[in-house]
């Protein structure tokens, strides 16, 4: 539960910092950056300053609420510590993005893509750590007709997905930092990986039945 409390503190801190710096922000805020880390989109001050904190609040509340609605919430209790840690990491990710947005709009020069690379690597790696520990449920993990119909298939598929998330996250982060123009290729490979995970769960169920 301490990770959930820490996550809530980060969400509140996003708003506190934003309100404190709001008078210094430009009327037209940079809110979108291209693959090379340069600004290519703007929004109004009120929208740009609070978009990320508001999304962060809704994401936090959704992550807290969903397990309570799960018919298999007893299974969730078996990995609730890892899940709470992920909630903290996810909230920290939003906090970090907001810091970057504020810093960029206050005149600090840096490549947004370069700065985001390590954060994405950590987020995906931690998602992989969570997948390793999940038990069959309706909201968290790789949920396909085949994983939801067989606990063994669930475990094998999510452990396999965990490895791909960790490797993919680190690769994605490194490319963002050192080779941003190749991001489209990495994203395509990650989409192929998602399709493969779904197919893998089907193969595992067939193997279990044979």
Image (cartoon, helix red, strand yellow):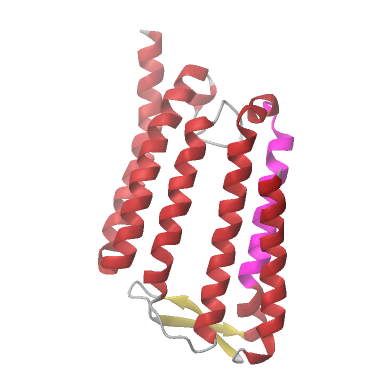
* SS majority, magenta: helix
Measuring from the top left, give residue 11's x and y in whole percent: 68, 62
| Residue farthest to the top, as pictured | 210
Residue 111 as seen in the image, left or right of residue 180: right
194 vs 145, left or right, is left
- 166 to the left or right of 140: left
The residue sitting at the front extreme is 2
On the rendered image, what quadrant is the N terminus found in? top right
- Is residue 57 part of the magenta span, yes or no? yes
Question: Compared with residue 165, is residue 181 higher up or lower down, i.e. above or below?
Answer: below
For this rendering, which residue is in front, 83 or 184?
Answer: 83
Q: Is residue 63 visible?
A: yes
- Magenta-colored span: 51-72
Q: In this view, does 154 lie above or below 142?
A: above
Residue at 54% across, 60% down: 93
Nearer to the camera, 22 or 137: 22
How many marks are shown on the rendered structure?
Answer: 0
Hey, which quadrant is residue 114 in on the image? bottom left
- The question of residue 107 being in magenta is answered with no
Corner quadrant of residue 117:
bottom left
Place of residue 187 in the rendered image (x, y in percent of width and height, measured from the top left)? 33, 55
Q: Which residue is drawn at 61% across and 57% down?
A: 91
Q: In which quarter of the image is the C terminus?
A: top left
Q: Where is residue 101 in the image (x, y as percent from the top left)?
A: 53, 77
x%, y% of residue 26? 59, 91
- Residue at position x 53%, y 68% in the image: 97
In the picture shown, does residue 86 fall above or below 45?
above
Name which residue lies at 60% across and 79% down.
48
Residue 150 visible in the snapshot = no
């Amino acid at each position: 539960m301490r990770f959930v409390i820490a996550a809530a503190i980060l969400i509140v801190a996003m708003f506190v910092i934003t309100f404190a710096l709001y008078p210094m922000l430009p009327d037209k805020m940079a809110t979108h950056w291209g693959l090379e880390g340069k600004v290519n989109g703007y929004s109004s001050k009120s929208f740009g300053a609070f978009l990320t904190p508001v999304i962060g609040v809704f994401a936090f509340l959704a992550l807290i609420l969903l397990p309570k609605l799960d018919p298999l919430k007893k299974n969730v209790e078996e990995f609730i510590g890892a899940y709470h840690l992920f909630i903290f990491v996810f909230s920290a990710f939003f906090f970090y993005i907001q810091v970057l947005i504020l810093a960029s709009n206050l005149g600090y020069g840096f490549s947004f893509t370069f700065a985001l690379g390590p954060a994405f690597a950590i987020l995906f790696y931690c998602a992989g750590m969570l997948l390793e520990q999940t038990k069959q449920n309706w909201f968290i993990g790789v949920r396909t007709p085949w994983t939801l119909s067989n606990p063994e298939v669930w475990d094998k598929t999510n452990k396999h997905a965990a490895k791909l998330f960790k490797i993919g996250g680190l690769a994605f982060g490194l490319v963002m930092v050192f080779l941003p123009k190749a991001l489209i290729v990495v994203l395509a490979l990650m989409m192929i990986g998602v399709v493969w995970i779904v197919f893998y769960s089907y193969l595992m169920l067939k193997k279990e039945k044979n």
